Image (spheres, rainbow, N blue to C red):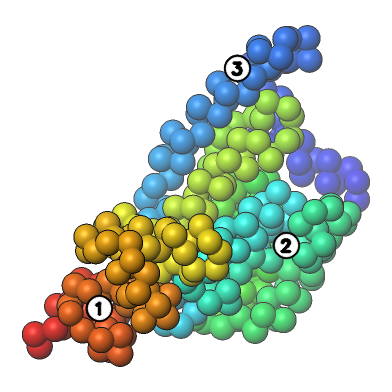
Amino acid sequence: MSKVLFDEIKNLVTESRNPATMNIDQESISQILYRINDEDLKVAAVVRQEMAYIERAVEIVVDGFKKGGRLIYVGAGTSGRLGVLDASECPPTFGVDPEMVQGIIAGGLKALTRAQEGAEDRPEGGAEDMMALQITARDVVCGIAASRRTPYVIGAIEKARALGAKTLYITCTPRAEMNIQVDVAICLVVGPEVVMGSTRMKAGTATKMVLNMITTTAMIRLGKVWENMMVDLQMTNKKLQERSKKIVMQVTDVPYEDAEVYLQKAGGHVKTALVMIMGDVSAEKARELLEKGEGFVRKALAHLNK
């Protein structure tokens, strides 16, 4: 079995040596840092090459959300942690239910801080987690595996497809080697890492960029952003409370004290406060208009004279 696994991974791009860093162990701190930075500079260009696939992935996610479905990230190790991170940031940033975007990692939550040896090698573990989540045809399941071959992730994707869900896959191996059946594959071929096999580096950076793009773009398309400001954020700490006031002030030109009062009347909901001020309506009417406007401030205001 070990030899079979060795043969499987020996030619992976993510497991190859980087000719530019062969002597990095003999270099100065400054030289090492520049080597790392030189490699990192390549990442954004690689992401751009996959833009058409990222766009299609976002379309699938938005469609799933509109049907009441969820986006479920599935990964192991660094890939799993990145999925959990992106999912955990959606509720405070965009005011969505924590169930809407979820990150599932091989080995469970304890794997976030300490490696759970062997958890990623069980495809049945991924399948079991999909069953536990009660995946349906409304959901979108996104596998994340730099090497493509992570058994846990493959097991989850296969089970999700069997349950009718749309499936995405983010990997750092060439498209020609992508042999897992999914609706959209995003292949971020960032090349060999500075330290061989350390996919927490370029592969992790590229993956994080794409996860940011998928959820941010999807939330914008759901009306969670006015111009370039997050207007569905949750006022869960003092910083976000003050950011909420700043947004209301910038959009409507009301003074600080008025922004505070309107937010109190709006139950801390920025979009409601904005519609109240710009539409000169009560909080109740503002919520009604937002519902008619499918959560978009502009559409809500357009309903004022209808």
Q: Position of residue 293 (x, y in %)?
A: 25, 80
Q: Say which quarter of the image contains residue 233.
A: bottom left
- Which residue is outermost to the left? 305
Name the residue type under label 3. Tyr
Q: Position of residue 17 (x, y in %)?
A: 71, 25
| Mark number displayed over residue 34 | 3
* Label 1 SS: helix
Quarter in which the C terminus is drawn: bottom left
Is label 2 or label 1 in front? Answer: 1
* Tag 3–tag 1 contact (CB < 8 Å): no
Q: CA distance from mark 2 to mark 1?
A: 42 Å
In screen coordinates, is 190 left or right of 195? left
Q: Position of residue 32 (x, y in %)?
A: 68, 17
Q: Position of residue 240 (x, y in %)?
A: 48, 61
User: Is residue 8 visible from the viewing direction of this image?
Assistant: yes
User: Is residue 223 visible from the viewing direction of this image?
Assistant: no
| Mark number displayed over residue 105 | 2
